[in-house]
Image (cartoon, grey):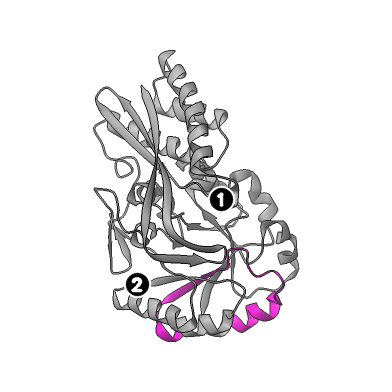
């Protein structure tokens, strides 16, 4: 068994802006597992917010790959055993995600099947959010209107700490019958959150994602929030769930945070046991990364796997996005 990896840069379809800045390119790392004439793949997106870069992720992958190749040579050939070995040899994050998902793909290919369809029960289609990036209220309203005109049923609205009500109002007026969730990406420090949460209720908002930085989570336990809150940056792996009780009602599961589908499945199970509802999210990435997240998406109340829609190009075969849904 041979494991290799390469960095890939993909231009964005249009500049994409969140509270931390604007992006014109997406940088992913792709892992390949080759054995017996088969080639399995996994993809991750290194995220600077978590101290990751393409270079650091490639170094982690090289180290973990050497360990996996040696384990394979010693007779550990079962994909499930290899995934268990990976969990113990590499911490959660983008690097482990790419290898873990490649191992899931490798498992499916061993039986001449396609991942994830052959290993998980998936519906024919899943509603996904379409992301409205930060801009002027008018520009965001135009994005929302265009999405709705193309069949969008769920919008995820990116926000920073400026013009929150004006931007949300503009989007809601442009998309009067569509479900809307908000994502502050930790940017609402310094705002009167209780007042803001109450003001936002008039716009029929389904959920607010990560209003404060992780280190300020404790204050959320003392702030009345009539709109459910979802932990994103505050929730990576199962070990963090207990600290979120009483502060959040939902958790956003992203494979690049959990370190792959293996931990994501464990996180989903434990989160639901503790009473959290689930969101399935993503970093920017291609259909290869979104496809690996589908087993979490089918368990989630809110799905946000529109990464490929925002890119200038996708992998082949690509997922089909139509009428605000992923066609599986």
Tag 2 residue: 152
Relative to 119, 85 lies left or right? right
In the depicted view, which residue is nearer to us: 19 or 125? 19
Residue 285 rendering spot, x and y as whole percentages: 40, 52
Name which quarter of the figure residue 282 lies in: bottom left
- Vertically, is 28 above or below 282? above
- Vertically, is 135 above or below 6? below
Which portion, as a residue range, is magenta? 172-200
Tag 1 residue: 48
Residue 273 visible to the viewer? no
Q: Residue at x 67, y 56 (%)?
A: 244
Tell me if mark 1 has few (under 14), some (14-19) or many (20+) residues whose alpha carbon lies within 10 angstroms of its own: few
Residue 208 rendering spot, x and y as whole percentages: 57, 69
Q: Does the magenta segment cover residue 314?
A: no
Residue 6 rendering spot, x and y as whole percentages: 39, 37
Q: Does the magenta segment cover residue 173?
A: yes
Q: Which of the two labelled residues, at mark 1 and mark 2, occupies the earlier sequence position?
A: 1
Q: Nearer the viewer, mark 1 or mark 2?
A: 1
- Label of residue 218 in the image: none
Residue 35 rendering spot, x and y as whole percentages: 30, 24
Residue placed furthest toward the top:
74
């Amino acid at each position: 068994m041979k494991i290799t990896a390469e960095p890939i840069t993909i231009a964005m379809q249009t500049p994409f802006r969140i509270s931390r800045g604007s992006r014109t390119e997406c940088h992913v790392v792709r892992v390949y597992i080759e054995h017996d004439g088969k080639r399995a793949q996994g993809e991750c997106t290194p995220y600077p917010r978590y101290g990751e870069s393409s270079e650091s992720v490639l170094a982690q992958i090289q180290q973990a790959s050497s360990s996996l190749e040696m384990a394979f040579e010693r007779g550990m050939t079962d994909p499930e055993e290899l995934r268990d070995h990976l969990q113990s040899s590499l911490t959660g994050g983008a690097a482990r995600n790419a290898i873990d998902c490649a191992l899931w793909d490798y498992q499916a290919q061993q039986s001449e099947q396609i991942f994830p369809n052959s290993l998980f029960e998936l519906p024919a289609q899943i509603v996904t959010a379409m992301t409205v990036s930060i801009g002027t209220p008018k520009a965001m309203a135009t994005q929302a209107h265009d999405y709705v005109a193309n069949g969008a049923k769920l919008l995820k609205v990116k926000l920073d700490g400026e013009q929150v009500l004006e931007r949300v109002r503009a989007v809601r007026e442009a998309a009067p019958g569509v479900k809307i969730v908000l994502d502050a990406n930790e940017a609402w420090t310094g705002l009167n959150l209780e007042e803001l949460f109450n003001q936002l209720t008039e716009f029929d908002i389904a959920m607010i994602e990560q209003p404060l930085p992780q280190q300020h989570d404790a204050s959320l336990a003392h702030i009345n929030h009539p709109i459910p809150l979802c932990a994103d940056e505050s929730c990576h792996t199962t070990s963090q769930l207990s600290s979120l009780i009483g502060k959040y009602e939902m958790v956003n599961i992203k494979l690049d945070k959990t370190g792959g589908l293996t931990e994501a499945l464990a996180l989903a199970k434990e989160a639901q046991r503790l009473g959290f509802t689930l969101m399935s999210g993503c970093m920017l990435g291609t259909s290869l990364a979104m496809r690996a997240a589908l087993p979490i998406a089918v368990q989630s109340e809110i799905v946000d796997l529109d990464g490929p829609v925002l890119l200038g190009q996708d992998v082949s075969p690509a997922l089909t996005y139509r009428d605000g849904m992923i066609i599986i």
